[in-house]
Amino acid sequence: MEIFDRILSGDVIAIALFMIGLYGLIARRNIVKTIICIGVMEMGIILFFLTIHARADANPPIGDQMAQAADPIPQALMITAIVIGVAVTAVALVMFIELYHKYGTTNWKKARQMRREEN
Amino acid sequence: MLYILLLAPIAIGICFYIFSFRRVPILVLVLQSLVFFFTVYIFWRVHGMEIPLVEAIGNWGPLSIQLYCDRIVSVFLMLTALLFLGFYSFVQGKDYFDKLFIFLFATLQSLIMLIFLSADLFNIFVAVEISTVICGILIMYKHDSRSLYDGLIYLMTNIVGMLFFLLGIGLLYRQFGTLNIYQTAALMYDAQGKDVLLPFAFIMTGVGLKCALMPVFSWLPKAHGTPGAPSIVSAVLSALYVKGGIYLFLRMRNMFAPAMEMDGFFLAMGIITGMAGWIIAVSQNDIKLILAYHTISQLGLIMIGISLHGASQWGAVYHIVNHAVFKSLLFLSAGMIVDTYHTRNIYRIRGVFRTMPVVSVATLAAILGITGAPLFNGSISKYLIQSGEINTAAEIAILLINGGTILSFVKYVHIFFGKPEAPVTSTVPTVQKAVVISLGVLCLVGGIGGTAFIRSLFGYTASISPLSYIEKSLIWVGSLLLGWLLYTRVLSKWKRLHQGFAIELTFNQICACITGLFAVILAYGWILTG
């Protein structure tokens, strides 16, 4: 069972999620799926940050209670990262909708073709 | 005190967005001049103290975000404020210059300053990410459908790059427990190359994308050369915004240097980027795309300078300043020429010298600067880049890159001569002429007083021997003759060239290139650390 615990630890899954997202970016031509893949990569990064210095026997950095605690800095960072991620996704989706109205396609390759014809 | 500099432009932008003032143009100029004088004051403070100005925001001790301002940063801040002042005077009276544009533009200014100033890795990530979004919106500000596609590619590519950067920050934080660049650099002395290989590869992939390294450059011409974007946005992106990326590369390189150094690799990448930049630039027919590919070529040159040691690094830093000046001038004048001739095809623009003499003279100054002509600013920085710890191969490569730049500007210069196809009337406002002329004068002054400038700005005494400077000037004249012959005798007769070669990767291919760059850096580092 110990080997499972090692494999299924947060950072391994985080890197795996990142790589799955990256695979999607390379292999999928659909623009919506691209935006989703960026979201998946972001989730991987957030999970990775949250596992940093998160051990079962960690002490809180301030105060004198001996309760269980994790490093608070990555958590603070990730709140910011989530907010930025939402904003970026929103902007990307708005741009995509506008592009869809103009070109009528969700495919990167077709969009490039139409962009070229417009020149 | 430094945070005032970051807040002031945003505050100005918000005020203009919420309240409607009657004399917006004058007010913007006055407030922006105040920002510029403030940066001059900061430069003077840093200059007098001889040690960097470090400020922590909030009372959190070592945990707080630090702003770090040394001499180089203070010069970049001054440059940013000065160029934005020029852009604000240039943009007066344009139809897209409304309150939303002012807000986005002002926010972009303070974010560029934050990228230069911040000493906190996560803070830099935030600044780069938000400025990417703002640039994306500014690129498609005129709702042109070509710019929509280009803006989307730009936004997505850069977000993917910054995700690599963010994961690298996470790996570094796990190892060192700090996000401060300078604390991390101090801890690097105890680290092994193997330990920091993975964060190095992730961070350098993200930063390399921002510097438009060779396989991952294709977002840059899309963003900087897109037809629908206002010329002022192209100028900001190409002159200032990419400098944030290349300065970030310099700082990351210095941060990792004690434990992990791949200067040879990045030197080779710089040479490839510099060569590819001008080769693709020669094969374009769109005036803005030519300038955009030139930015890639010059970024390669700056990267060569950074990867070499000693005087070359100072040459690279001075070249960042110079490139900002002449590239903004080139983009602004290209915008005016396109507005007058209603075409972007370089083969159909002729006789600019007769229709717009003032703009032509200023553009000529910028062209002499970028090609490194004697007495102009590019010659000093290119001389310094060549004078560091250099081997013959790198020197030949630099000469080739410069020769190629000259060759493609021989093509560019042809727009000045001849007769226009249809009669054109130029209506360039005086203030725009004044902006380009003052930038052109800066190109000349930066060359004549080059060493004095470098000494007073960066505190570095550059040694330029007159004899080898004359030798370099003769090489320049020789390259010019060679380039002129090659273009007029061979290249201009090649009909296929007139249609232009479109080199466009799809988004999936760009992502594959990013992954490839990451894999190459990782593999090379693996071999290097054993």
Image (cartoon, rainbow, N blue to C red):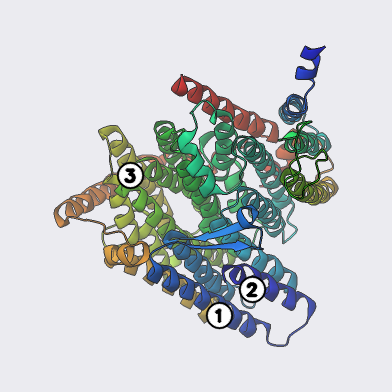
Q: Nearer the viewer, residue B446 or B328?
A: B446
Task: Check the image and report above or below for B255 versus B26.
Answer: above
Residue extending farthest to the bottom is B22
Whole-angstrom CA distance, mark 2 to mark 3, is 43 Å
Q: Which mark is residue B474?
A: none
Neighbours of disc 1 within 10 Å: few (<14), some (14-19), many (20+): some
Q: Nearer the viewer, residue B350 or A81?
A: A81
Whole-angstrom CA distance, mark 1 to mark 3, is 41 Å
Which quadrant of the figure has residue B230?
Answer: bottom right
Left or right: where B44 falls relative to A77: left
Whole-angstrom CA distance, mark 1 to mark 2, is 10 Å
Q: Nearer the viewer, residue B239 or B347?
A: B239
Element marked by disc 3: helix
Where does label 2 land, which residue?
B8
For the residues bearing labels 1 and 3, Cβ distance under 8 angstroms: no
Where does label 1 land, which residue?
B34
Which quadrant of the figure has residue B323?
Answer: bottom left
Task: Check the image and report above or below for B524 versus A77.
Answer: above
Q: Nearer the viewer, mark 2 or mark 3?
A: 2
Where does label 3 land, which residue?
B403
Q: Position of residue B32 (x, y in %)?
A: 58, 77
For the residues bearing labels 1 and 2, Cβ distance under 8 angstroms: yes
| Circles 2 and 3 on the same subunit | yes
Upstream in the sequence, badge 1 or badge 2?
2
Element marked by disc 2: helix
- Amino acid type at circle 2 is Ala
- Amino acid type at circle 3 is Gly
Upstream in the sequence, badge 1 or badge 3?
1
Residue in the image at 68% along x and 34% along y? B506
| Circles 1 and 3 on the same subunit | yes
